[in-house]
Image (cartoon, grey):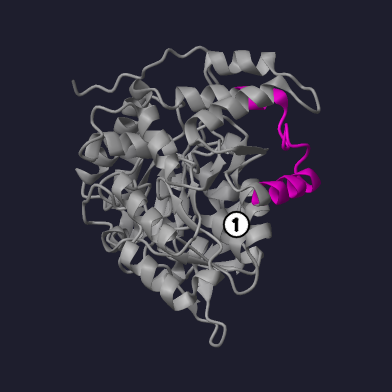
Amino acid sequence: MKTIIEPFKIKSVEPIRFTTKEERVKILENAGYNPFLIHADEVLIDLLTDSGTSAMSAKQWAGIMDGDESYAGSRSFYRFESVVKDITGDKFIIPTHQGRAAEKILFSIIGGQGKFIPNNTHFDTTRANIEFSGAEAVDLICEVGKHPEQRADFKGNMDVEKLEIFIKETGAENIPVVMITITNNSGGGQPVSMQNIKDVKEVCKKYNLPLFIDACRFAENAYFIKKREKGYENKSIKEICQEIFSYADGATMSAKKDGLVNIGGFLSLNDDELAIKCRNLLIVTEGFPTYGGLAGRDLEAVAQGLEEVMEESYLQYRIRSTEYLGDKITAANVPIIEPPGGHAIYIDAKRFLPNVPPNQYPGQSIACELYIEGGIRGVEIGSVMFGKYDKKTGALISPSMELVRLAIPRRVYTQSHIDYVAEVIIEVYKNRDKLKGYEITYEAPMLRHFTAKFKPVN
């Protein structure tokens, strides 16, 4: 069957606002040509992020009503803790209000000047929290992961050989942790193979280094392993997830992704001493260890969502829906990261706008035009998000890829919404020669993409 049938019925709906093209031109100008600064009710299809934008299930909403709001010892925490322990196998579960809070706690303790933290590819908040501590975030993506047009099953893998070389050159004593992000968000939502996780773990064992998983999209990654990696085709998603975490010494997670909720996250650990330090800092910054900045109702919703996300029927629909959008636009020659990832389609801005140089932000140009043309909000992942300036010359240092991410919220949009998105992308691509670059008129010192303002290049 070619038709993608959503494995759910719609129980509640929310209206979306239609605007004219003329209105959108003015809205974008007032927002400083930054889609982050557009009011949500001025967006028709919001693909800015899949974080915290999922639709919750009836059982999750039931959990909202059933939440125990006790300050200490809430039964909602113990249900949450039980579910997370069952998946990760970790001894200590620390709830946080979202993933970056878990990162902030962890890196405040293990980071610092002179420290280096390798990953397949760090995403924005992970990198920012590492750098805020004074440490350096290092990306060691496999070679094929650097080439958007090349197809491979596991383009999110870490380059294990480069990892070992990096450890030898840097010194294991200067590396507090090695991380793997699943799926690899900055690298196109591409999955990491179980074999790669095993291989990274072996290197970590050799040099006595802990391995942590950035687990935002752990279930989506597990589904790719089931479908693409030999020996896992008959394993359940939960079994695959449990094996992934068995190779790790801890995890950070934003439950706003594969927790299918609007808020929440956690830090899971096995090291007793580190767990004590993290809990003590949690109390200062987030709250008591049995709520961690979350209401009891939110802990209930996360616990239920973590169980629902491992249902194979849901994951089949989820991955196929993303693939469907990728197939439609590549049929019209729109360049994307191939093959489509789990949670988003990533337009390759370098090939889409070859005449717009990185210092004029081709991804930002495409993101702005998608909003003008059809009210679609996406996000640039390129020189705006990850660009740095040379300390001596002030010249822009660009990342290897210039992308526009269109992240699909979970259980929110139907196939007709996605058909519309494809039509808008194809229309923008047909008229790509009319697009201009942008220059930055304001930027913050860190995570500038959230609040930066731009103007078109004349």
Residue 284 image position (x, y, % from top left): 80, 47
Residue 117 image position (x, y, % from top left): 52, 64
**Crowd band around label 1 with a 10 angstrom C-alpha radius: few (<14), some (14–19), many (20+):** many
Who's the residue at 23% across and 56% down the image?
149
Q: Assign the N terminus to one quadrant of the image.
A: top left
Dividing the picture into quadrants, the one containing residue 290 is: top right
Who's the residue at 29% across and 31% down the image?
320
Label 1 is placed on what type of residue?
Answer: Gly
Who's the residue at 65% across and 27% down the image?
299
Residue 331 image position (x, y, % from top left): 19, 43
Left/right placement of residue 260 relative to residue 338 reads right
Left/right placement of residue 78 relative to residue 372 reads right
Q: Nearer the viewer, residue 350 or 297?
A: 297
Q: Which residues are magenta?
A: 274-300
Q: Nearer the viewer, residue 211 or 224?
A: 211
Could you tell me what secondary structure mostly forms the magenta stretch? helix
Dividing the picture into quadrants, the one containing residue 424 is: top left
In the rendered view, tell whether residue 151 sits above or below residue 303.
below
Q: Is residue 309 magenta?
A: no
On the question of residue 367 being in view, the answer is: yes
> What residue would you read off at disc 1?
32
Left/right placement of residue 159 relative to residue 167 reads left
Residue 437 image position (x, y, % from top left): 43, 66
Q: Is residue 288 magenta?
A: yes
On the question of residue 156 being in view, the answer is: no
In the rendered view, tell whether residue 139 sits above or below residue 320.
below
